[in-house]
């Protein structure tokens, strides 16, 4: 099955959906957005590495920034922060204007540091799946670069991770087609969520989100 361009999802939505499906629904279906310091920092990190038309060559590595990517089979579109192309004449792909074969290695830049949840890894995996489809080349790994720690984390793009991406996108497409915004499900991240005032406007004006959720859990209201 192939999706029409009109039905494409933003790849960046994967991290929202993974963090909280309601947050994704508010942003991508209801089109609300509320910028806080974390999203602002994230935007600055991305602006620093998105510089389209910029291809740098370092020895046997070509570096592309801000590459537009898409997949008709997944129904997604987006942009890679950085894609390194490593010379690999056994398992690479052709690149216009360059001799030999090149293996893509996507790198996603993130604010903060490595997290336990797979949100960043899922987003990276989706990017790799798009690149694979566009360039007809298998991609087994990529990396996440964390701005706060200045560390690069290598990520193996396992079958499980790919399966999770596919299942998540299927669900997101279903919600988008039906216009369904998932309901509130309190979670630890609510207190730092950029949308908490929009998601829970009355509650946020009266008390902290944490104290509200503590009360909710204690009373077992949900
Ligand atoms: S406040 Fe909590 S439930 Fe609401 S969108 Fe944010 S993370 Fe999700």
Image: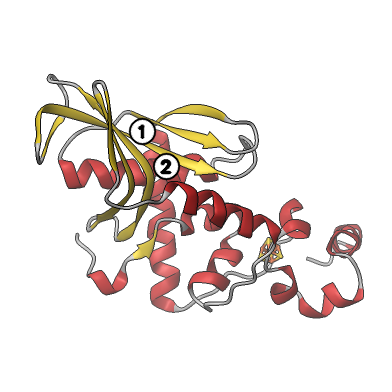
The residue shown at (86%, 63%) is 216
In the image, 146 versus 200, the foreground residue is: 146
- Decide if residue 117 is on the left or right side of residue 124: right
Vertical arrangement, residue 136 with respect to residue 219, above or below: above
Q: Badge 2: few (under 14), some or many (20 or more) residues near its Cα, within 10 Å?
A: many
Residue 111 sits in which quadrant? top right
Q: Which residue is under mark 2?
A: 124
Which quadrant does ligand 1 occupy? Answer: bottom right
**Residue drawn at point x = 64 percent, y = 31 percent:** 149
Using the image as rendered, state which of residue 166 and residue 125 is in the foreground: 125
User: What residue is pinned by disc 1?
Assistant: 159
| Left or right of residue 173, residue 181 in this image | right
**What residue is shown at x 32% (from left), y 41% (from top)?**
128
**Residue 5 appears left or right of 143:** left
Residue 176 badge: none
Residue 89 percent location from the top left of the image: 12, 20
Disc 2 on helix, strand or loop? Answer: helix
Location of residue 143 by image quarter: top left
Q: Residues within 10 Å of mark 1 (few under 14, many from 20)?
A: few
- Quarter of the image with the N terminus in it: bottom left
């Amino acid at each position: 099955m192939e999706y029409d361009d009109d039905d494409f999802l933003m790849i960046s939505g994967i991290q929202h959906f993974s963090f909280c499906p309601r947050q994704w629904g508010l942003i991508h279906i209801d089109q609300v957005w509320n910028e806080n310091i974390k999203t602002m920092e994230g935007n600055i990190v991305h602006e620093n590495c998105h510089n389209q038309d910029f291809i740098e060559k370092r020895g046997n590595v070509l570096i592309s920034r801000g590459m537009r990517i898409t997949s008709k089979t997944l129904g997604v579109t987006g942009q890679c922060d950085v894609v390194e192309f490593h010379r690999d004449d056994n398992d690479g792909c052709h690149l216009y204007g360059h001799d030999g074969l090149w293996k893509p290695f996507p790198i996603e830049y993130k604010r903060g540091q490595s997290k336990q949840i797979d949100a960043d890894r899922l987003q990276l995996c989706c990017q790799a799946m798009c690149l694979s489809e566009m360039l007809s080349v298998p991609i087994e790994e990529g990396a996440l670069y964390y701005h706060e720690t200045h560390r690069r984390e290598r990520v193996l793009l396992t079958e499980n991770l790919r399966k999770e991406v596919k299942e998540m996108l299927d669900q997101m497409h279903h919600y988008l087609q039906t216009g369904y915004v998932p309901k509130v499900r309190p979670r630890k991240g609510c207190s730092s969520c950029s949308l908490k005032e929009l998601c829970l406007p009355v509650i946020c004006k009266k008390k902290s989100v944490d104290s509200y959720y503590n009360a909710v859990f204690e009373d077992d209201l949900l």
